[in-house]
């Protein structure tokens, strides 16, 4: 979010912004897929079903990068057709999702540990 807002305010150029963001796309896809599979294996159905659409979206977004682009974030296209705004909106939604998951995981951890 900070890198995209820096690009929006012209504090950094599009190429450095996209290279910073693209280096985190693959670890994000792998990490989210691993967490989703672990929730399936451990039979936490609600959390699995909550993570499945986000993991699917991350994989779809990574696979559908057009050939010739630098990655999911492309410096030649980030200012076209409102892509910067859509990337900002997606980053805010993911931030909210990860905060929700963090507190859900924390609640499950505390509820399993605390004596009744």
Image (tube, grey):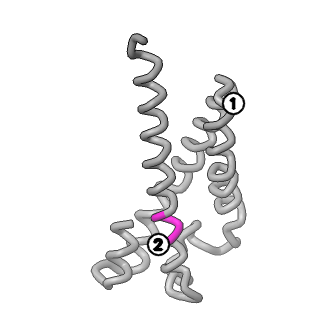
In the picture of the structure, the residue carrying the numbered disc 2 is: 88
In three-dimensional space, the C-alpha distance between marks 1 and 2, rounded to whole angstroms, equals: 30 Å
Q: Secondary structure at mark 2?
A: helix
Assess whether residue 114 is covered by the magenta stretch.
no
Lateral position of residue 29 relative to residue 24, left or right: right
Camera-nearest residue between 97 and 67: 97
Q: Which residue is depicted at the point 69% across and 72% down?
A: 66
x then y, percent, for residue 32: 57, 44
Magenta segment's dominant SS is helix
In the picture of the structure, the residue carrying the numbered disc 1 is: 40
Query: Quick one: label 2, few (<14), some, or many (20+) residues within 10 Å?
Result: some
Q: Which residue is depicted at the point 62% across and 29% down?
A: 38
Assess whether residue 91 is covered by the magenta stretch.
yes
Lateral position of residue 11 relative to residue 32, left or right: left
Q: Which residue is depicted at the point 67% across and 54% down?
A: 59
Query: Quick one: label 1, few (<14), some, or many (20+) residues within 10 Å?
Result: some
Instruction: State which region is magenta.
Output: 88-92
């Amino acid at each position: 979010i900070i890198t995209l807002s820096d690009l929006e305010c012209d504090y950094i150029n599009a190429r450095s912004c996209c290279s910073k963001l693209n280096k985190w796309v693959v670890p994000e896809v792998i990490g989210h897929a691993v967490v989703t599979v672990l929730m399936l294996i451990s039979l936490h159905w609600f959390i699995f079903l909550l993570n499945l659409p986000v993991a699917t979206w991350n994989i779809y977004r990574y696979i559908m990068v057009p050939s010739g682009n630098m990655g999911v974030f492309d410096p030649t296209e980030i200012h076209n057709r409102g892509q910067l705004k859509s990337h900002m909106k997606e980053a805010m939604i993911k931030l909210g999702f990860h905060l929700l998951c963090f507190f859900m995981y924390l609640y499950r951890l505390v509820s399993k540990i605390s004596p009744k």
